[in-house]
Image (tube, grey):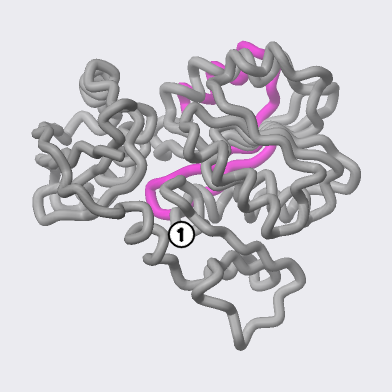
Amino acid sequence: MKYFEVNFTIEAPAELMQDARDILSALAGEAGFETFEDTDEGIKGYVQQALFNEELLKTLIGDFPLPSCAVKFAVGEAEDKDWNEQWEQQGFEPIVVSETLVIHDGRHLPSDLKPQTSIEIDAHLAFGTGTHETTRMMVSQLMSLDLEGKRVLDCGTGTGILGIAALKLGAREAVGYDIDEWSADNARHNAVINMVDSRFTSLLGDASILKEVEGRFDVVLANINRNILLNDMETFVSKMAPHSTLLLSGFYEQDIPLLEEKAQSLGLIKKAQQHDGDWACLKFIFD
């Protein structure tokens, strides 16, 4: 398949450059991008030509959440080779969360660790291996919940890591969805290799697809950027059961007041707040 190679140039203070790269990667993922490489000037992204939505990308960049940063991009055709094979060979080192849960890929096994919970993730061009601060915080918050027998919704599932983690921590069922076809397929694949596929459903679409999902959920997870959280939170709440929990991440500490205001307007009660660097995670209860 044919890909575009897009070079993103970021003008940002040195201390914000990595954060700007992380945010830009998340935003570009919404415009069809599948993988990224850091460069001296910013990042380089790859997107299937048939899936590239340049107008959406311009809109997302125009609303970039770090006012002190500016982003430009240039589009060119990527070299015609087997990108999938190259990206899938990269892998990542095992990540330990709260000393009792480890996330690893099939190439980097945690030989010297004996965790209570082990999750294997093959990240076939999808976001969510546990290497990012927001994913680690979400998993950490999941570990603090009583998930036994609970039904879980994983919004923007990516690799499926959060839904899979919930199932391994005792949840009865998990439903995930993602706007990216590759991610939805990858989440199904990861559910299989973690032997939870009979309890995990991965759907292709945005939050509007929840109209087709029957029933309500005890726990809703959303590790997505601030603007999508603000836009979709009302839909999340419409699928939440009484006394259910909403965990949110994918945003900065400075975004918390906006998200809290939106949550409060929907009847959500804030119960916890966590930080990892400048990134934040919020826990709400729906009574």
Q: How many marks?
A: 1
Q: Is residue 30 above or below residue 159?
A: above
Quadrant in the rendering for residue 168: bottom right
Q: Residue at x 58, y 19 (%)?
A: 207
Q: Indicate left or right for 192 with 265 as reference.
A: right
Magenta part of the chain? 257-283
* Residue 273 position in % (x across, y down): 58, 42
Q: Indicate left or right for 8 with 176 as reference.
A: left
Q: Which residue is mark 1?
A: 131
* Residue 160 position in % (x across, y down): 60, 45
Q: Considering the image in quadrants, where does the C terminus appear?
A: top right
Q: Residue at x 17, y 44 (%)?
A: 78
**Residue type pointed to by label 1:** Thr
- How many C-alpha atoms fall within 10 Å of the one at disc 1: few (<14), some, or many (≥20)? some
Quadrant in the rendering for residue 6: top left
Q: Indicate left or right for 241 with 230 as reference.
A: right
Q: Considering the image in quadrants, where does the N terminus appear?
A: top left
> Which residue is farthest bottom?
112
Was residue 258 drawn as part of the magenta stretch in this picture? yes
Was residue 287 drawn as part of the magenta stretch in this picture? no
